[in-house]
Amino acid sequence: MDIQRPILVLLSFLLLTAGAAAQAPPGAEKPPPASKPAAKAKAKAPAPAKAPAVPAATPTPAATPAPPTVTVAPAPAPDDPNVDLVFGAYQRGQYKTAFDLATKRAENGDAKAMTMLGELYANALGVKRDYARAADWYKRAADAGDREAMFALAMLRLSGRGGPANREDAVKLLASSAKLGNPKAAYNLALLYLDGQTLPQDLKRAAELLRLAADAGNAEAQYALATFYKEGTGVDKDIDKAVRLLQAASLADNVDAEVEYAIALYNGTGTPKNQPAAVALLRKAARQNSPIAQNRLARVLMSGQGAPMDKIEGLKWHIVAKTAGRGDPMLDEALTDLSPEDRAKAEAAARKWLGTK
């Protein structure tokens, strides 16, 4: 069985959603082709931002995606025990304590403490949510050179929270934060170069920024850059590099990367073939509610190629995937061919997974 899933990306503002269709086991109907990416200017776009969201069979971009939530965990200065106390309280969920300690430090001009106050206000941690105050504290910290504050303030500027939306200011902040080595800033700046709306589309620059973020361990950037190498977008096409990046992102629990890497392992594309490992990854991604993985796993279990045949389990995953919009006529037919007893077992197993009666 040859499983394929060409990568397509739907980029809208700062939301990146990968989606694709995969070939079925031998004798199965070919699923409908994936829809074209939202911005197909000269080249295909790669897959979170966001954020990678779980892909559907034929992805449809949201009309207006929700603004990104600012979540910044400012790193404590290693030589400052007072800041360590602030960060430690934050990590333990003692947000009111973190707020009180950070306020004292911020009054003395500590940029990390200012960033912490911005984080607490932006996410209603220990205090009432107040984007205006969050933006104010982030700006103070950004002016003092804190790269996390620059990134967080840029995200607020892009979303129009805490003040009017200001993409020009956001771009400057992201560029400054990325220059100071913030991988999240580099990744989001790459998305803006890819989008071609806030900034002129520049695929090579986007690839450079993705590489910076990927090298720093950002899983979303690793997955997006893998897509660039797979399709030759902004870089020379290189399947081996693409698969290595997919492996790295997969190890960091990026669900889209898990699915793509599983397919590469299953087919032996850019890596030695290892079907048991591929099926294990598909199971993991299926349990993380990826409809693509659920559908691929269902086909594997129904065909018995790469894993022992288990029609009840396979059709359970088919039903689960179908509820998320991943239909499959071949598996629908297989479900009708099942005995009433086995069909009831598959449906019961699906309901248990979905938490329905």
Image: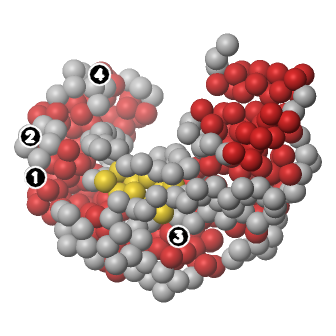
At 61% from the left edge and 78% from the top edge, which residue is drawn?
A: 239
Query: In which quadrant of the rendered image does the N terminus lie?
Result: bottom right
At 51% from the left edge and 76% from the top edge, which residue is drawn?
A: 231
Structural distance between the alpha carbons of marks 1 and 2:
9 Å
Q: Are marks 1 and 2 in contact (CB under 8 Å)?
A: yes
Within 10 Å of the Cα at label 4, are there few (<14), some (14-19), or many (20+) other Cα atoms?
some
Camera-side mark, 4 or 1: 1
Question: Which mark is on residue 166?
Answer: 1
Within 10 Å of the Cα at label 3, are there few (<14), some (14-19), or many (20+) other Cα atoms?
many
Question: Which mark is on residue 262?
Answer: none
What amino acid is at disc 2? Gly
**Circle 2 is placed at which residue position?**
163
At 19% from the left edge and 50% from the top edge, which residue is drawn?
A: 158
Image coordinates of residue 166 in percent, x first then y, are 10, 52
Residue in front for this viewpoint, 27 or 111:
27
At numbered mark 4, what does the secondary structure look like: helix, strand or loop? loop
**Circle 3 is placed at which residue position?**
226
Q: Earlier in the sequence, mark 3 or mark 4?
A: 4
Please state if 247 lies on the left or on the right of 135 as rendered: right
Query: In which quadrant of the rendered image does the C terminus lie?
Result: top right
**Circle 4 is placed at which residue position?**
126
